[in-house]
Amino acid sequence: MPPLPTPTPRPAPPAHNEFLLKPNRHPMLGAEIAYSAGIVAGIYFVRPACWLIAAAAAFLPASIYFLTTRKWLAVTLALATFFTGGSLEIQLRGSSNIRPLRHARARGQQLKLCALGFDTSHV
């Protein structure tokens, strides 16, 4: 009977933190955080829309330019583009009519919401 091959030891499993911190686990997380931070900043720090458009138009080509030489700078500029996009979105967004409708109902005025199928004129 031939001798059995010697078993090779199994490699050690990766550490728990090493598995969770892989860069490809959440590829859009940084962009989502930058965009939401831009929305929050756009509420409190109002700038003219043309400034934000110019900033985004400058950040994006600069990010593409630095992509091959300085990756960290390219990523930072890309996140700045998302930040200015979020700030621009919150400033250009139209105001909602929900708040005046609530106040009108609180003052006792009659409302008629036809699009939703509610008619409060008989109340």
Image (spheres, helix red, strand yellow):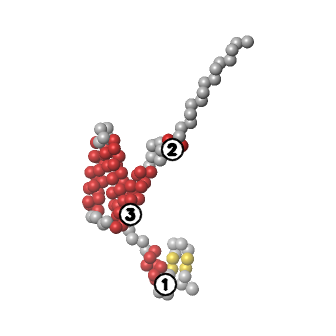
Q: Quadrant of the N terminus?
A: top right
Foreground pick, 66 / 122:
66
Looking at the image, is mark 3 or mark 1 earlier in the sequence? Answer: 3
Measure how far apart labels 2 and 3 are at the Cα level: 31 Å
Q: Quadrant of the C terminus?
A: bottom right
Instruction: Look at mark 1 in the image and give the residue it sits on.
Output: 106
Residue 122 on image: x %, y %: 57, 85
Confirm whether residue 89 shows in the render: no
Instruction: Look at mark 2 in the image and give the residue it sits on.
Output: 17
Q: Amino acid at mark 2?
A: Asn
Residue 68 on image: x %, y %: 31, 38
Instruction: Look at mark 3 in the image and give the residue it sits on.
Output: 40
Q: Amino acid at mark 3?
A: Val
Q: Residues within 10 Å of mark 1 (few under 14, many from 20)?
A: few
Q: Amino acid at mark 1?
A: Ala
Identity of the residue drawn at 51% across and 76% down: 113
Foreground pick, 116 / 31:
31
Task: Name the secondary structure under disc 1.
Answer: helix
Identity of the residue drawn at 49% across and 87% down: 108
Task: Name the secondary structure under disc 2.
Answer: helix
